[in-house]
Image: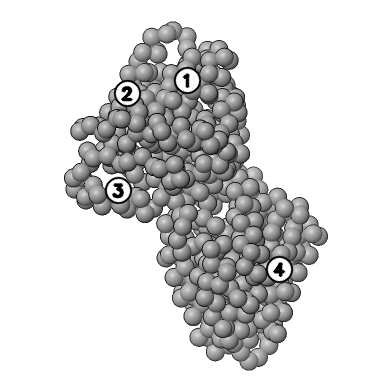
Amino acid sequence: MTEFILVPGVFTGAHVWEDTAARLAAAGAGVHAVTLTGLDGPLAAAEAGIDLETHIADVLAVIDSVRAAAGREIVLVGHDYGIHPVLGAADRRADHIARIVHLDAGMPQDGVPALAAVPDQSLRTRVGERAGVDGAGAYGELSPPAREEWRRWGSTAGVPDAALDRLTALAAPQPLGTLLQPLRLTGAAAALPATGVLCNGNGAGIDMVQMRVDFGDRALQALADARVTFFELPTGHWPMLSCPAELAEVLLRAAAGEGHRLKPAGAGRPPAHLRPFLLDVPDLPRERTGNVDLYLPGTQGPRPAVVFVHGGPLPAEARPTPRDWPTLMGYARYAAGQGVVGVTLDHRLHDVADYERAAADVAAAVEVVRADPRVDADRVALWFFSGGGPITADWLGAPPPWLRCLAATYPVLAPLPNWGMAAGRFHPAATVAHAGALPIVLTRTGLEIPEIAATVEEFLAAAKDCGVDVEVVDVPHGRHGFESLDPTEESREAVHRAMRSVLAHLTA
C-alpha cells in the first residue's frame, strides 16, 4: 500500500489536490495533502522567519507521522516549488521514502535557491533586487498573481474557468525566504527511485528531455538511470486542476515503478543529431575562422550565401559542437554544391536566458560572412533550425535589404510556456507583421513534438492575419530532426524543395 504526500507549489495550499486526492483514496492509497506554513489561505500573511527550512520541516512532520503506519510505502510528490521542500525532506528521511515524483518540476541542486526555477526571468530579477544581494528583505512576501497572471508561473492550459477562479481566490502570499534560501542536500536521497511527470502543454515532453540527454548535458545524465521513469500529460502546469483523474492514474502507476525510461547518451545507435545526413552531397572542404565555417563553391566571383543557424539550448560542454553535426554540414555542402557559399556557425545558446547573447553571435557571424570578398554581401539567406527559431524575430522585425530569404526548419517560433519569455524580443509571431515582402520558407514536420508544433501554428496564424506569405514545405511523416531520423524519399524531397526555393530567392 502507498501513502502519497502531496506538496503544492507557490501561492497554493492543500486545496489544489482535492480532486486528485479523492481519486487516489478511492484506489486504496493513503493521501496527505500538505499546506505549507504561511500558505493557508487568502488572508494569510508571510510571517517573519518563514523560509525553505520551515517548509522542509512541514514535510518532515508529515513523513514522521505517516511512517508510524507499518507496511506503507511513502511517495513524495512535489509540484512546482513544492519539489524543493520535498527534496530537502527526502534528503533527511531517505530510508523511509519509496519514490519522489517531480510533478512538472525541475531538478533542484544543492546550494541553489528556488528563485532560480521561477520561469519568468523578469520576475526573478525583480525578486532578487527586492531582497538585495545580502539577503535583506528575505522575510517579506510575494503577492499572489491576479487571475490573468497565473500563466507567468506556468501554462494554465486545460484549467476550467471555475478552477482558475478558485485558485485565484484561495491564493496566499509566498514568503520570500522560501524562494531565496538555498536548498541544502547531502546526497542521501540521490539514489531514491524518481519519476518525472511532464506537462507538455507547459513546454516540456519526454522527447525533448531525451534530446537534451543525447546532447550530452551532464546535469541530465542521471535521468537515464533505470530507477528514473517518466510520464507526460497533454495539459498545462496545473494537472491537478485540469486533469485530476489522469494525474491520479499516473501517480498510481509511478508508485508501482511504471513509466518510460530514457536511453543513456551513447547507448546503442548514435544520437539523432550525429547520424548521417539523408542526402549524398559533395565532400567539399571548409574554411574555419573563429566560430564560422565557410563551404565554398567551385565557381569564381562573389557568390550568394546561406547561413545555417543551429538550435538549442545546448549544454556548453556538448561535443562535437553544432557546426560539426552531419545535418548542418550536409545542408552547407548541399548549398555549396549548388553554387552558393554555405555557412555554419556555433553560437552560445546554452540556456533560455541566453537568447540575447546567441542573437548577437549570429549577427556578428553574418557580418563576418558578408565582409568576405568571396560572398555577395547583397545576397544572403538565413536558415534557422529548431530552438534557433526565436532569433528569427530580430530579422523578421526589420529585414535588411540584403536579406533575400529567411528559412526555418522544424523551428520553435514562440517561447515555450516554461521558458518565462511570454513577451519580449524573441517572439517571431509578434514581429512577423513587419516582415513585409521578405520571402519565408518554413519546413514543417507532421510528427513534430506537440509543444513545438503549437508555436509553428501560432506563427502561421499571425502571418496569415497580417498578410505575410509563408511557403510551407510539409514532411507529413517526418519528426523533429527528420534529416537523420527519417531518411525517406518524402524527407529527401522536402529538403530538395526547401533548398530550391531558398536558392531561387537568392538568385532572383
Q: Which residue is mark 3?
A: 127
Q: Assign a secondary structure to mark 2.
A: helix
Give the x, y percent position of residue 279. Answer: 74, 65
Q: Point out the tag, 4 or 3, that comes first from the N-terminus.
A: 3
Query: Going 56% across and 19% down the picture, which residue do you hit?
Result: 23
Give the vertical position of 111 relative to 398 (above or below).
above
Q: Assign a secondary structure to mark 3.
A: helix
Q: Assign a secondary structure to mark 1.
A: strand
Q: Point out the tag, 3 or 2, that comes first from the N-terminus.
A: 2
User: Does the CB distance between marks 4 and 2 fall below 8 Å?
Assistant: no
Report whether residue 78 is seen: no
Task: Work out whether residue 330 or residue 355 is closer to the camera in this orientation and state it.
Answer: 355
Give the x, y percent position of residue 277. Answer: 69, 62
Cα distance in 3D space between marks 4 and 3: 43 Å
User: Does the CB distance between marks 3 and 1 fall below 8 Å?
Assistant: no
Choose mark 4 or mark 1, whichever is in front: 4
Q: Point out the tag, 3 or 1, that comes first from the N-terminus.
A: 1
Q: Which residue is mark 1?
A: 4
Q: Which residue is mark 4?
A: 471
Q: Is residue 49 left or right of residue 100?
A: left
User: Does the CB distance between marks 3 and 2 fall below 8 Å?
Assistant: no
